[in-house]
């Protein structure tokens, strides 16, 4: 990517690049896309192809829409080097943040989505996206009259979820959360039907259900990671108990948010202690 950007926009000055990440690799969480987006933004800024948006006294800043589009296009090229034929979803989310709808190759940002609290759990079960996708295709070819309605239903779930998410910021009613929880449950059952479930993910859902929480797989399935929706009024004791039981299964678990901003330039003063420690060792 550095050579390609230099060839198009002029020499990139001599730089040292330190990569630090909280995302586990190979778990279906888009760590490669996050890397590609950050690298593209850094190199394009360094060679002057895009501006440095950070003004004096600011702790964070983001680029213009036009500049974000350029960052995304180069990040996608980086994803192609890593994955061969990526969808472009992961780098788009990493660039713009929030939530996106992906259908038939078209990526559409969702408007005004809320920030949702989740538990993110890594089952540590390795899986191959290529193998899982091939298995789904095989089922569709073998049982088209059965599988196509299931896929139509999954699409309807996604559309219903989009409607709920876009309605929440204007009317932050707690009544939306039971709807999202039910959609999580229905979606997870459908994903098992098409063959991308795994006993470890079933266990994850059982453990969180015992604490009154609702979960589903994320990414390609077949192991990897799952997400658990946390209502605003979910008690800290319930969250800690669920995390404890998930870790007892050998899983890794983090509490985080969905709907955060995309790629952002930070001043050194805004970085947390862990990142500063990593930088100081370079």
Image: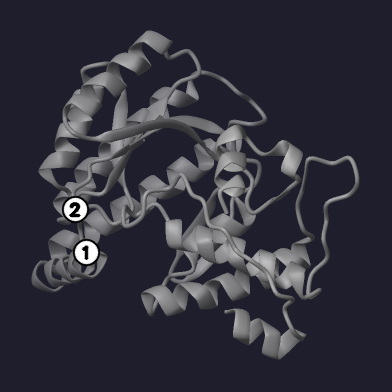
Q: Residue furthest right?
A: 56
Instruction: Please identify the quarter of the rendering in which residue 273 is found.
Output: top right
Above or below, comparing residue 134 to residue 60 in the picture: below
- Contact (CB < 8 A) between labels 1 and 2? yes
Above or below, comparing residue 237 to residue 135 in the picture: above
- The image shows residue 25 at horizontal and vertical percentages of 36, 55
- The image shows residue 34 at horizontal and vertical percentages of 52, 58
User: Is any part of residue 108 visible from this angle?
Assistant: no
Q: In front here: 110 or 31?
A: 31
- The residue positioned 17% from the left and 56% from the top of the image is 194
- The residue positioned 61% from the left and 46% from the top of the image is 280
Judge from the rendering whether residue 280 lies leftward or rightward of residue 88; answer left or right: right
- Which residue is under mark 1? 128
Instruction: Please identify the quarter of the rendering in which residue 241 is found.
Output: top left
Q: Residues within 10 Å of mark 1 (few under 14, many from 20)?
A: some
Judge from the rendering whether residue 159 lies leftward or rightward of residue 66; answer left or right: left
User: Is any part of residue 9 visible from this angle?
Assistant: yes
Instruction: Please identify the quarter of the rendering in which residue 143 is found.
Output: bottom left
- The residue positioned 53% from the left and 57% from the top of the image is 19
Q: Earlier in the sequence, mark 1 or mark 2?
A: 1
- Which residue is under mark 2? 222
Which type of secondary structure does the marked residue at label 1 adopt?
Answer: loop
Which quarter of the figure is the N terminus placed in?
Answer: bottom right
**What color scheme is it?**
one colour
Q: Which mark is residue 209?
A: none
């Amino acid at each position: 990517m550095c050579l390609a950007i230099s060839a198009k926009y002029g020499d990139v000055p001599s730089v040292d690049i330190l990569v630090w990440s909280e995302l586990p690799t190979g778990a279906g969480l888009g760590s490669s896309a996050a890397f590609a987006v950050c690298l593209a933004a850094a190199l394009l800024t360094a060679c002057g192809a895009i501006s440095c948006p950070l003004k004096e006294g600011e702790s964070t800043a983001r680029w213009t829409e036009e500049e974000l589009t350029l960052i995304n296009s180069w990040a996608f090229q980086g994803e192609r080097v890593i994955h061969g034929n990526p969808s472009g979803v992961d780098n788009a989310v990493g660039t713009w943040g929030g939530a996106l709808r992906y259908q038939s190759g078209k990526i559409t940002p969702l408007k005004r989505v809320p920030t949702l609290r989740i538990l993110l759990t890594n089952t540590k079960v390795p899986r191959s996206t290529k193998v899982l996708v091939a298995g789904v295709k095989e089922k569709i070819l073998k049982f088209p009259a059965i599988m196509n309605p299931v896929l139509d239903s999954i699409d309807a779930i996604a559309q219903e979820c989009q409607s709920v998410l876009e309605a929440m910021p204007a009317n932050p009613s707690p009544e939306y959360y039971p709807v999202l929880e039910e959609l999580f449950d229905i979606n997870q059952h459908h994903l098992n039907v098409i063959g991308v479930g795994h006993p470890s993910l079933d266990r994850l859902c059982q453990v969180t259900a015992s604490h009154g929480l609702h979960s589903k797989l994320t990414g390609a399935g077949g192991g990897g990671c799952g997400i658990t929706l946390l209502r605003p009024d979910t008690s800290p004791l319930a969250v800690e108990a669920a995390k404890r039981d998930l870790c007892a299964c050998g899983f890794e678990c983090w509490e985080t948010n969905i709907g955060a901003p995309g790629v952002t330039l930070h001043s050194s003063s805004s970085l947390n202690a862990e990142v500063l420690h990593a930088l100081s060792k370079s």
